[in-house]
Image: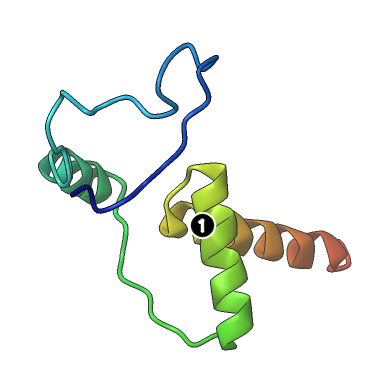
Amino acid sequence: MPRHEFETPDDVPEPPLTPNTGGVGAGADLGRRRKAAAANDWKSFSSYLPEDLQRRFRAECAMSGIEVRSGLDQAVRTWLDSRQASKPAG
């Protein structure tokens, strides 16, 4: 007896999902990423944010396809640049 009884329309040209035949690649490029991080002199940075802000930030990074650290890098640089721009010259 099947576990599920799903109805599939007859006019579907192909299944909505295709099987992954390439295997699992989780962590496959970890060595390369570590070398790249060392080459850029990335340093560990730890801080606290309100939970809702952290969730929104992580979600936005994920939807944008960037790493959280890259999003943080952009945010900090933008913040620092705006502060520098608001300082009087001289």
Above or below, 19 relative to 89: above
Q: Residue at x 37, y 46 (%)?
A: 5
Above or below, 82 relative to 1: below
Mark 1 is surrounded, within 10 Å at the Cα level, by few (under 14), some (14 to 19) or many (20 or more) other residues, namely few
Above or below, 47 relative to 12: below
Out of 54 and 84, give the one closest to the viewer.
54
- Locate residue 60, reporting x and y percent: 59, 56
- Locate residue 13, reporting x and y percent: 48, 11
Please, what secondary structure does the residue beneath circle 1 have? helix
Above or below, 53 relative to 21: below
Q: Residue at x 58, y 66 (%)?
A: 57
Can you tell which quarter of the image residue 11 is in? top right
- Locate residue 46, reporting x and y percent: 38, 80
Query: Could you tell me the amino acid type at mark 1?
Result: Asp
Task: Look at mark 1 in the image and give the residue it sits on.
Answer: 73
Q: Residue at x 47, y 30 (%)?
A: 8
Out of 18 and 37, give the one closest to the viewer.
18
